Amino acid sequence: MIAENFHKVEEEIEAAKGRRRPGIGDKGVLLVAVTKNHDIEAMRAAIDAGATTVGENRIQEAVSKYEALDRTVSWHLIGHLQTNKAKQAVRYFDLIHSVDSEHLAKALDQAAGKIGKIQDILIQVNLAKEASKSGVYRENLLALLDTIDKKMANLHILGLMCIAPNYEDVNDCRPLFREMYEIFSKVKEISYKTANIKYLSMGMSHDYKIAVEEGANIVRVGTAIFGARQY
């Protein structure tokens, strides 16, 4: 069932790419299989079906899985990260989606430097300014990007991430995703010292098709692949 679900999501992504507006293009979309609260066997089933990347929300859960998985896969941290977990985050994750402040960025920069790593990150943008979600506000985004690029040599910014509000009508996500793509496109045009802005991570199980239509090239999908989470 997991393999079937995974392939169905892949097919839906391809179909959504075909519905993109002119100018967005037909570039690839990375499907991150969100494995939070799903066991090792479920993770292996998704990887064996073709998943190359898994996404975890919590450090402690990810660490226990990392050591038991017995599969080669890229690990993405997609949940909110506390600064006191920066040391573990840089040790286990290839890409951290949820950098949302200079304070957190400094902690990651220092932790990465101590192990000789250049840590790939995305900057999380709270476009809807929801109190319940993390993320830098749009008006503060460029300043944060500039500070990290100029002052934090152990961090490598690869793009932006956002989470849409949980609208009753999923189509209400579209204007936000469209605006996020416009921000992403403008940021891509800026000449940075080390940043390489190429990823726009947006869209989850309920709204990933709309996100892809509006320009996402990373989507984070859990329930549509694994079914309801096991708590």
Image (cartoon, rainbow, N blue to C red):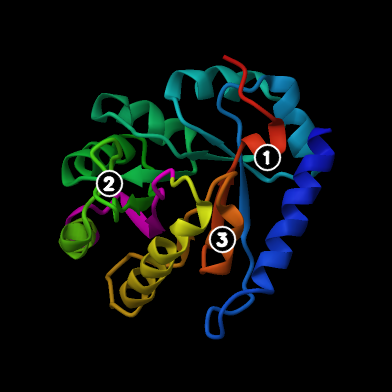
Q: Is residue 164 left or right of residue 211?
A: left
The image quarter in which residue 48 lies: top right
**In the image, residue 139 lies at what x, y percent?**
16, 62
**Label 1, residues with CA under 10 Å away: few <14, some 14-19, many ≥20:** some
Segment colored magenta: 149-166
| Residue annotated with mark 2 | 135
Q: Look at 33% across and 32% down and name the residue there.
A: 81
Q: Look at 63% across and 51% down and name the residue there.
A: 31
Structural distance between the alpha carbons of marks 2 and 1: 25 Å
Structural distance between the alpha carbons of marks 1 and 3: 14 Å
| Residue annotated with mark 3 | 210
The image quarter in which residue 179 lies: bottom left
| Residue annotated with mark 1 | 224
Quadrant containing the N terminus in the rendered view: top right
Question: Are circles 2 and 1 on residues that touch, CB within 8 Å?
Answer: no
Question: Are circles 1 and 3 on residues that touch, CB within 8 Å?
Answer: no
